[in-house]
Amino acid sequence: METPEARVPVLLVHGIRASATMWRHQERTLRAAGYPVLAIDLPGHGKRMGEPFTVPAALAAIDDGVADLGGRVLLVGLSLGGYYAVAYAAEHPGRVAGLVAAGCSAVPQGVLLEGYRLLARAIHRLPDRGLWLHENMARLLLPAAGARDVLAGGAALDVMDSGLQATSTLTPLTSIAAYPGPVWLVNGALDHFRLNERRFLAACRNGQVVVVPRATHLSSLARPERFTAILLDVADRVSHAG
């Protein structure tokens, strides 16, 4: 009989403005299935609100999480977290048994990123820095449980521009090509961050695309049961691969 110790630890890395609380559904289900699991806060988010967001600090946060789980993990990142998970896997392939890069199959540069930064700056000029908009969009676009989870850790409103600027310096296509392990590109069917999905898949040495039906960008929150089923399947495959 397989023991819990044989199961790969799972490290979860959140998206921009969010925090570790966005992974509550996945944490509960993975832990109930016997997987060691940890969701971290990136700098400037959640319990680390107010800290500056930089590339080295974000990668260090992931490295600390990997160490806390024993030194080798299934690394799962969504959106912002996905880009940094990819960068980390390229730098530390021996510490990443498998990589799930969700909602980050678009090169974070050019018109897409600059348009996002302009919008973020405009929203930040609002009297509440965009808090009302952030909370109400979450409640409008996500199921009630997903909205509660993503809002529970607070809104990292002050890190938007610096986080996006830092992310624009990453080279995810080069990084994903450098990682030799298995990669799952998990994207919502309606996600605008699928823009370069074929290029990302082609760059992988050992990759596949998994589409979450009827899901938008935050697929783990929009379709939590389906997303978590994908993670359980991936974790089982990585565990059995050793």
Image: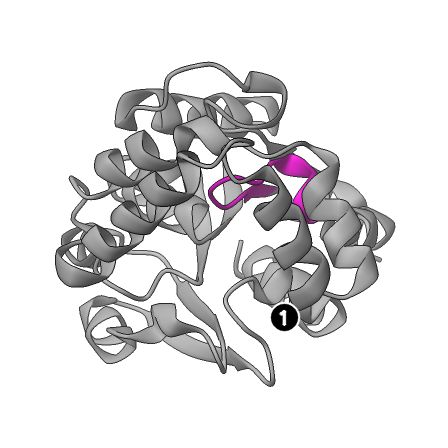
Q: Which residue is at the far front?
A: 127
Q: Is residue 139 left or right of residue 194?
A: right
Image coords of residue 133 (percent x, y): 58, 49
Image coords of residue 64 (percent x, y): 49, 21
| 126 w.r.t. 174: above or below | above
Q: Which residues are magenta?
A: 11-24
Q: Is residue 74 left or right of residue 204?
A: right
Residue at point 59% right, 31% down?
40
Q: Quadrant of residue 4?
A: top right
Residue at point 27% right, 65% down?
106
Q: Is residue 165 left or right of residue 240?
A: left
Say what amino acid the circle numbered 1 marks: Ile
Residue at point 71% right, 70% down?
229
Q: Quadrant of the N terminus?
A: bottom right
| 100 w.r.t. 69: above or below | below
**Is residue 222 visible in the rendered structure shown here?**
yes
Image coords of residue 182 (percent x, y): 39, 62
Q: Quadrant of residue 209?
A: bottom left
Residue at point 24% right, 56% down?
115
Q: Which residue is at the far top?
A: 51
- The residue indicated by pointer 1 is 230
**Nearer the observer, 169 or 61:** 169
Q: Residue 16 in magenta?
A: yes
Q: Residue 2 in magenta?
A: no
Image coords of residue 122 (percent x, y): 35, 43
